[in-house]
Amino acid sequence: MIRLEVEQGEAKGRVFEQDAEEITLGRAPNSDLLLPDWHVSGSHGVITVESASGAVRYRDLKSTNGSRVIRGKQTLPVDSTVGFELALKHGDRLQLGDHERPVLVGVSIAVLPATTPFLPTTGSMLTATIPPRADGSSVLRAATVQAVEEPEAKVLVMRPVETVAEVQRTVESDPGSLKGLLSVLRKLTGAIELDEVFDAIEAAVFEAVPKATHLTLALRDDSGDKPTYVAVTTRVRGRTDKSGEAVPISKSVVRKVVEQRAAVLAADAMREVGETASIMGAKILSTMGVPLWRGEEILGVLQVDNRAQPGMFKDRDLDLLMLVGQQASLAVHNARLYRQVKQAEMSARTENSFLKQRAQKKFEGIIGDSKAMQSLFEKMAKVVDTRVSVLIEGETGTGKELVASAVHYQSRRKDRLFIAQNCAALPETLLESELFGHKKGAFTGATEDKKGLFELADGGTLFLDEIGEMPLGLQAKILRTLQEGEVRPLGSGVVKNVDVRIVAATNRKLEDEVAAGRFRQDLYYRLQVFPVRIPALRERREDIPVLAAHFLKRYTHELGKPVAGFSQQAMELLMSYDFPGNVRELENEVQRLVIQCEPGGYVMAEHLSPRIRNIEGLLDKIRAPRGTLKDMIEHIEKWLLIEALREHGNNKSATAKTLGITREGLHKKLKGYGIS
């Protein structure tokens, strides 16, 4: 058994511990011990172990800056004088590369005694001797395997992290498992961003463990008074939508993994781990928890569940998952370091640089991948290069001005001005002067000629926000400008021709305003040539994660304060909240969260505003009264039907479509529950 620990250099703290006949060192990505320092050669050296004698030797591969071995107070060169090869002893330190600031690698050598294979037996205690560490100390841990005397042979297996080398030897003795393991571990190499690492872990777990149906990854968060483990991602086999089903992390599994520093297999989760709410509610058949570790530190916990596959997890599944966890530990650690470097670079940028980037970018883009937003994009694409007026309808905070600017900046008019005016912001006289301009002396205070917005926007686009608030007298003049393309400034007898595209927006229903006599019918029809409705945020909840991530990135950048991301529970609460203020309310919430959270920490559920956390009481609202299973299910189904009808304004066709059933099927259910 060889244990190498980088004591000095860019990879300081990196540990390679394995029972192998050959270990490569260098800057090349495929090196067993990767040393990224510039003065280390791609293939710098190799450590070999003779299988018969157990002798360990280091061979320099004729590197550019050479190798030395520090033994006690001696420094032994590894060059042509010794044939570029030298025997290694326990406690030696390799000195690689540059002489002034070399990379130092501590070497620990031990021979493992033959041990009984790691197989679960009733009431057995298996002990493995772990090789000494770099400081000469040794660790002795016991791997306890308990079997429960029951007809279904349910067992609980634990693998301490110190036994990973023993587990690896067991797996490598099986050619079939070894081939599959190599294929799996390749997926975890090369990933540098955390999202890429999460995707690679998902692929590796589901390939290595065929019975796995769900996995949840919790990472350690040190931002609070004491370390906690926060669920950051959940994946479901066969599902590409990462914002779909939420899978709660089992606190009991996390606790056992962290306290025991061991991988845990519960063949019957409900009996062996405990009848916790998360396990009982999720109907977990069996579960495994594997630590992600680096030295003595537990970086996170990977929980893998079996909820649908026939049969329980076996100890070989735990062995394979533990080896995946070993490689995932390094990948997660490196990705977090990479993120910290990126965040440090981001914080180092000056405010002037940030403002310059914002000034150069006229339009940041509309964010949304939902079907409702895709439909909006299709409509916009059809109208951007036409001359017709566009009426944008939507609730407050949905981003009507953003859509209006997109219509302008993606059209052939993008090189001319885009001017926005809120029709509710000024009284009628001032608004008329603002839109049409005035001549000197036209009214008290008109001390000089002024061009109106129509004239300034000639060749471009004029955005009239809240047009439903415009006074009736001014609506007639707007109508003439739309029909004739003419404007006449206040106090002037001269008419000017203008080529202005009108984009109007309102959060009111103009049909109701026309019926009430507050809006001209002829102007309404003139504006209604191409209506565009922006969906409320509650109608496209699947866009909340990407919008929240966008605003988090913006405000961590702007405020120079890194935040690691959203915990799974916090994101679930955000997606469950209705957001009456829509995207603007979400943006304000994220900005407040960035200010409130500790640097480098995760956004937790308790950080959210009280109005959003109130959604936690939703389960209390639908809690079924005690009774038979049939009665409780019917109670919940009735509540869901009523809520769906309310959300769609009692539109049964839309409700049935959302629920994924036919209109006839919905009528049948409503009749059965006595709902009209």
Image (cartoon, grey):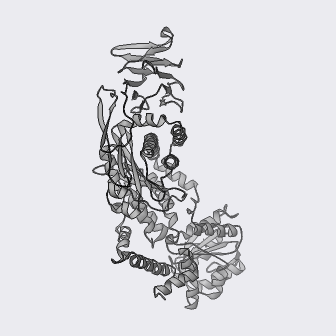
- Looking at the image, is 91 positioned above or below residue 169? above
Residue at point 37%, 43% (across, down): 120
Image quadrant in which the N terminus is located: top left
Residue 406 vs residue 84, the one in the foreground:
84
> Is residue 600 visible in the rendered structure shown here?
no
Taking 218 as reference, is 495 above or below it?
Answer: below
Q: Position of residue 649 (x, y in %)?
A: 51, 82
Q: Quadrant of residue 407?
A: bottom right
Examine the rendering and report whether any part of residue 367 can be seen: yes
Q: Can you say whether 306 is above or below 75 in the image?
A: below
Please provide percent x and percent y for residue 5: 39, 29
Task: Please state the horizontal and vertical placement of residue 657, each as a whole percent of the image.
Answer: 57, 76
- Residue in the foreground of this view, choosing between 34 and 521: 34
**The one of 574 and 311 positioned closer to us in this rendering:** 311
- Between 416 and 280, the one nearer to me in the picture: 280
Q: Residue at x 43, y 68 (%)?
A: 576
